[in-house]
Amino acid sequence: MRRVTIFGATGSIGQNTIDLIARAPNDYKVVAVTGGQNIAQLAKDAIALGAEIAVTADENRLSELRDALAGHDIAVAAGPTALCEAAARPADWIMSSIVGSAGLEPGLIALEQGTQLALANKESMVCAGALMKDTAARHGADILPVDSEHSAVFQALLGENIAEVERIVITASGGAFRDWPMEALARATPEEAATHPNWDMGQRITIDSASLFNKALELIETHEFFDVTPDQIEAIIHPESLIHALVGFRDGALMAHVGPPDMRHAIGFALHYPERRHLPVDRLDLAQIATLSFRPPDEARHPALRLAREVMQAGGLAGCAFNAAKETALDGFIARRIGFLDMAAIVEEVLDRLSSKAGQIDAAMTLDNVLALDHLARQEAVHAMDRKQQQG
C-alpha cells in the first residue's frame, strides 16, 4: 500500500487525483490533504479518504476545519508552517498542485524526503528549477511532471536521448479569447476570461490560459525541466487540445502525444509510473475527429510569450520575478484594478526595474533569495498598478 499526500486537494488537479485514488482504495493510504478556502470540500475529502491530517493554508479557517472534522480521527492544522510540516510526513508519492509560488517550499521539503513528487505546480520550476532539481538529485527523489504538456514531453522522451532532440513543441488551446479581435481584449472582463473552451480548471489558471501567461510559464518550465535551450522550444495554437506536445528529433521525426483533454491522464501516468494502468478517460475516435488544426501564436497579441523568452535568456531568478509579477497582476485584473491587456505591461515593467538593479535577479539560487525576490517583485507590481491607475 502506497502512502500518498495531496497538496491542493480541493482544486481541479486535486479532485481528479482523488477520483483516481478513490477507485482503488486498497492500494493507497492517504497521509495528508491540504486546501485553501473550500473547507467543506477539504473536510469531505479527508473523511472519505481516511486521511491522517487535513491542512488549510488559511490560518483563519482552522476552527472551521476543526468543527467540520469533529468526531473523526483526523488531525487538523492551518497556515504555511502546517503545510511544510505536512510535506515532511513520510509518503511514497506526493501531488503538488498548490497554485502559485506558495507550492515551492512544501515541494522542496517533500523532495528532501526522497519521495516521488508529482508536480502540477509549474511555478516551482519557473521560480527555482535548478533548486528543485538539485534537491531531488541530492535526496534520490523523482520529479514527475503533471502538466499535460510536460507529461506528454516526458512520455515522448522515455527511452530517448535528450541530446538527439531538435525541438519541443508545446500546444496551447488559445483560451477563451483565441478568436476575439484584438480591440475587444482591452474590454475583456474576469468572468469572460475565466471560461475555458476545452478544460475544466480553476479561475486563475483559466485566466492565465486566456492571456497565454499559462503557456509562457510552461515554456520556461520546459526549459528548466528538460534542459533544452530557449530556441529549441516552440508554442503553437491547437484549438482541439488533443495533441498536448510534440518532440522533434534531429532525424526530422516528430513524436506527438495525443489524448483527450482530461487531466486524469497525466495524473494517472504520474501516479502509476513507471507502469501504465487502465484510466477512466475517453478513447479517441480518430475518424470522428477527422481534422486537427494549428496556427502560430501572435506574440503582439500575447506578449507573455515574448516575456517568457526574455526570462529564459536572462536566467538566474528572472523566472521568480516573472511569476510573482504575473500573480500580482492577475490579482489586479480579477479585482478590476487593471485591464486584461495591462497584465503583461505590469510584468514587463517589473522585469525591467529588477533587471536594472544588481544583486536581484542575478542573486544566487537559494530558497531565501527566491522568497525575498518574490516579495520584492510583488511590491514592484503593486506600485506599477498604482501608477497605472493614477495615469487613468
Image (cartoon, rainbow, N blue to C red):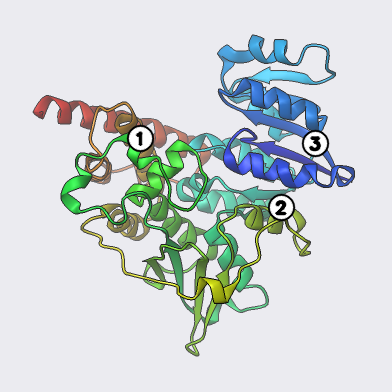
Mark 2: which secondary structure? loop
Circles 1 and 3: CB atoms closer than 8 Å: no
Which is more N-terminal, label 2 or label 3?
3
User: Disc 3 residue type?
Assistant: Val
Quick one: 102 or 141, which is closer to the camera? 102
Mark 1: which secondary structure? helix
Q: CA distance from mark 3 to mark 2?
A: 19 Å
Q: Nearer the viewer, mark 2 or mark 1?
A: 1
Which residue is identified by label 1? 191
User: Disc 1 residue type?
Assistant: Glu
Q: Residues within 10 Å of mark 2 (few under 14, many from 20)?
A: many
Q: Quadrant of the image for the C terminus?
A: top left
Which residue is identified by label 2? 141
Residue 249 at least partly seen: yes
Q: Position of residue 63 (x, y in %)?
A: 65, 9
Residue 377 at least partly seen: no
Q: Nearer the viewer, mark 1 or mark 3?
A: 1
Q: Which mark is residue 30?
A: 3
In the displayed structure, does residue 291 sit left or right of residue 341? right
Q: Which mark is residue 255?
A: none
